[in-house]
Image: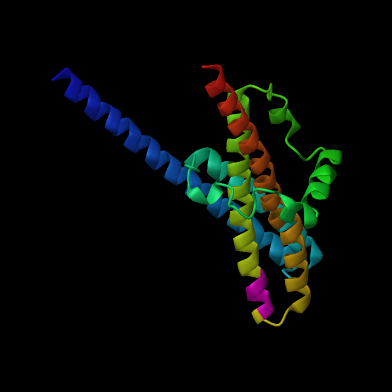
Amino acid sequence: MQSKVAHKRGLRKIDAMNVLRFVGATAVTLIIAAILFLFGQEVGIRSVLFAFFSNFFLMLWVHWLFRLVKPSLTSPYFEPKSFERGGWSYRSLGVVAFGKILKALKWDKTGRRAQFDGSPASIVMLENETRSAEAGHGIIFLLMLGLALYVLARGWWDAAGWLTLFNFIFNAYPVMLQRYNRIRLVRIMQRMNRRSKGAI
């Protein structure tokens, strides 16, 4: 009897947390949407400033959204595909150079990477971070792409150009960088697994 009561209480707590997460995610979404709308009204949706800073507003939105919702990033989509495993396609597109620029600008989450100690657990942590970062930038990429297509349909070629340029810089290349990093991390994990099996 007590176990059933405890189970019901546990379910109620989960339901309450889900409601709070939904309310929080909705509130964050509405706030960022309002900020984007007001900012667009102030500087103009066709301006370079809007195309540039809208990415940062959306990054802030994704950051808080993921903290509230805590999405499960276990989709097969995140697993490296056969054509990616060598990494040459990303290197040829300048993804490695892009990563070096981010490091020079201290934009590579050095605080989190400082927790990396070479252990299997820290490698798994970094691999999970690449999934989260890729998912966030991927969502923003699609949103900005939709906005670019909208302004293009309106005949605002200048706005479409700026939105597309900054979308590639702030979202497309970060997505590719995270996938490239994941390829390397998966290789390290595979080597560790082979060594652990060989040691048994």
In the rendered image, the vertical position of residue 135 relative to residue 12, given as above or below: below
Q: Residue at x 73, y 25 (%)?
A: 114
Name which quarter of the figure residue 165 lies in: bottom right
Q: Which residue sits at x=63%, y=21%?
A: 119
Q: Residue at x 39, y 35 (%)?
A: 17
Q: Work out which residue is located at the far left of the displayed protein and give it.
A: 1
Instruction: Measuring from the top left, give residue 88's x and y in whole percent.
Output: 74, 52
Q: Main secondary structure of the magenta part?
A: helix
Please give the name of the residue rendered at 48% of the width and 47% of the height, measured from the top-left corner. Answer: 75
Colour style of the rendered protein structure: rainbow
Q: Measured from the top left, where is residue 18 in percent x and y?
A: 38, 40
Q: Horizontal and vertical percent for residue 65?
A: 54, 45
**Vertical placement of 43 versus 133: above or below?**
below
Is residue 11 found left or right of 104 in the rendered image?
left
- Residue 118 visible at all: yes
**Image label count:** 0
In the depicted view, which residue is nearer to us: 93 or 2? 93
Q: Position of residue 9 (x, y in %)?
A: 26, 27
Is 143 located above or below residue 127 in the figure? Answer: below
When asked about the image quadrant of residue 102, the answer is top right
Image quarter where the N terminus lies is: top left
Q: 137 or 86, which lies in front?
A: 86
Say left or right for 145 vs 162.
Answer: left
Q: Is residue 61 visible?
A: no
| Residue 143 counted in the magenta span | no
Which range is magenta?
A: 148-152
For this rendering, which residue is in front, 116 or 12? 116
